[in-house]
Amino acid sequence: MLLLAWSAPLLACSSQSAVVRTLQVGPANFRTEIVAGPEARQRGLMGRTELSDEMAMLFVFPDEQRRAFWMKDTPLALSIAYIDRRGIIQQISSMEPYSLERVTSLEPAMYGLEVKQGVFERRGVRVGHRLDLDALHGITAEH
């Protein structure tokens, strides 16, 4: 089980190069930092204090299984969409700042997409909507 959040300002680079792309999710587009390596996935949004409604972070995993995220050291309230390997949103859950409670996917997921809490609802993104996987061309998850 992998536990995640986010760190450093969005669009900033860590020890691994950040990949930033615009992703379409249902009716909305998000300027998205994509994290595919284990260190970047574990760090996630830890320590970040700002995130606009147009920004997101996509966690890319090497396989599809039940996932769990937490909010350790994360001061922002977030929403997470658990997305299957076909790009279909299976679940959207809220996560509270600094919580150590695990927010677990009910179904297997290959992707987790985090946004500021309430943004999915405000932008019309719902369970059953699709993430455009074509925008992920060339991105491979590391173990």
Image (tube, rainbow, N blue to C red):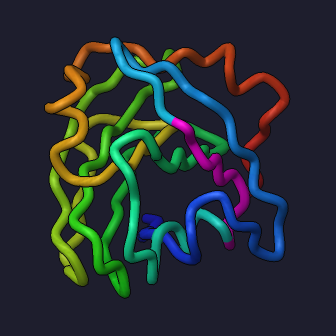
In the depicted view, which residue is nearer to us: 107 or 36?
Answer: 36
Residue drawn where x is 31% and y is 39% of the image = 81
Magenta range is: 31-39
Looking at the image, is 24 positioned above or below residue 21?
above
Q: Residue at x 78, y 22 (%)?
A: 137
Q: On screen, 31 above or below 70?
A: above
Left or right: where does residue 57 sit relative to residue 75? right
Q: Give percent across and percent down for residue 101.
A: 18, 75
Q: Residue at x 34, y 12 (%)?
A: 27
| Residue 10 percent location from the top left of the image | 57, 61
Is residue 100 visible to us here? Answer: no
Is 141 located above or below residue 74 in the figure? above
**Quarter of the image containing the N terminus?**
bottom left
At horizontal 67% and vertical 34% (from top left) the residue drawn is: 21
Q: How many marks?
A: 0
x%, y% of residue 133? 61, 18
> In front here: 100 or 11?
11
Which quadrant does the C terminus fall into?
A: bottom right
Q: Which is nearer the eye, 83 or 126?
A: 126
Residue 58: give x, y in percent of width and height: 53, 45
Magenta run includes residue 131: no
| Residue 132 appears anywhere in the view | yes
Left/right placement of residue 19 relative to residue 51 reads: right
Residue 48 placement: quadrant:
bottom left
Q: Quadrant of residue 112?
A: top left
